[in-house]
Image (cartoon, rainbow, N blue to C red):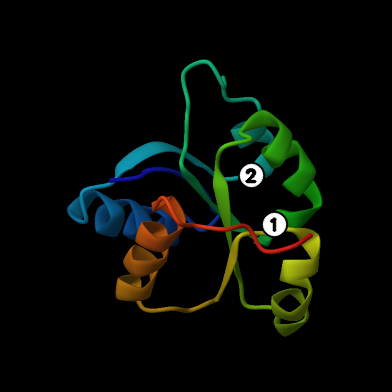
Amino acid sequence: MARVMIVEDEGDLSELYRLVLHAGGHTIEGIYADPLSALQASPCTLHPDVIILDERLGMKSGIAHLSEFRSKFPAAKILLASADPEVLDDGPAKGVDSIRKKPFPMNELLDEIRNLSGPASKRLPG
């Protein structure tokens, strides 16, 4: 099963992700309300396979920090979650591994985490 980091500023949603992922057998590597807190986490103790990254984190953009996440956690796949249709079209060009339009069913989240953490997973060009 996958080790998952959650970067989401809506507490109820990050808790839902946590519950669903835990029930699906995944390990939560950390829950962060903003990208800077997640980036300050120690790469020595955290080794996420997948990072669920919200695009809009209050006044901050998750995708604006994408290169920093790639640098800090190079082995992690990044699943971008966004309700913004423009971001959904732009995401692959930015180099995310997967994009999900909010809201999405939790069974899709589990399927996508499984796909991203599997041995045959590939990064979208970017």
Badge number at residue 102: none
User: In x, y percent, where is residue 41?
Assistant: 57, 25
Q: Amino acid at mark 2?
A: Asp
Badge number at residue 34: 2
User: In this orientation, does residue 59 appear?
Assistant: no
Residue placed at 67% from the left, 59% from the top? 96
Identify whether 105 is placed above or below 80: below
Dot 1: what SS? loop
User: In this orientation, does residue 49 appear?
Assistant: yes
Dot 2: what SS? loop
User: In x, y percent, where is residue 54?
Assistant: 60, 59
Give the residue number, with chain letter if any, for mark 1: 58
Residue closer to the observer: 29 or 121: 121
Q: Is residue 100 left or right of residue 60?
A: left
Q: Is residue 60 left or right of residue 4?
A: right
Residue placed at 79% from the left, 59% from the top? 126
Identify whether 110 is placed above or below 107: above
Q: Is residue 57 left or right of residue 102?
A: right
| Mark 1 and mark 2: Cα distance apart in space | 8 Å
Looking at marks 1 and 2 on the same chain, the residue that comes earlier in the sequence is marked by 2
Residue placed at 53% from the left, 77% from the top? 102
Q: Is residue 44 left or right of residue 83?
A: left
Identify whether 87 is placed above or below 19: below
Q: How many marks?
A: 2
Label 1 CA crowd tier, 10 Å (few <14, some 14–19, many 20+): few
Q: Amino acid at mark 1?
A: Gly
User: In x, y percent, where is residue 40?
Assistant: 65, 25
Identify whether 27 is placed above or below 20: above
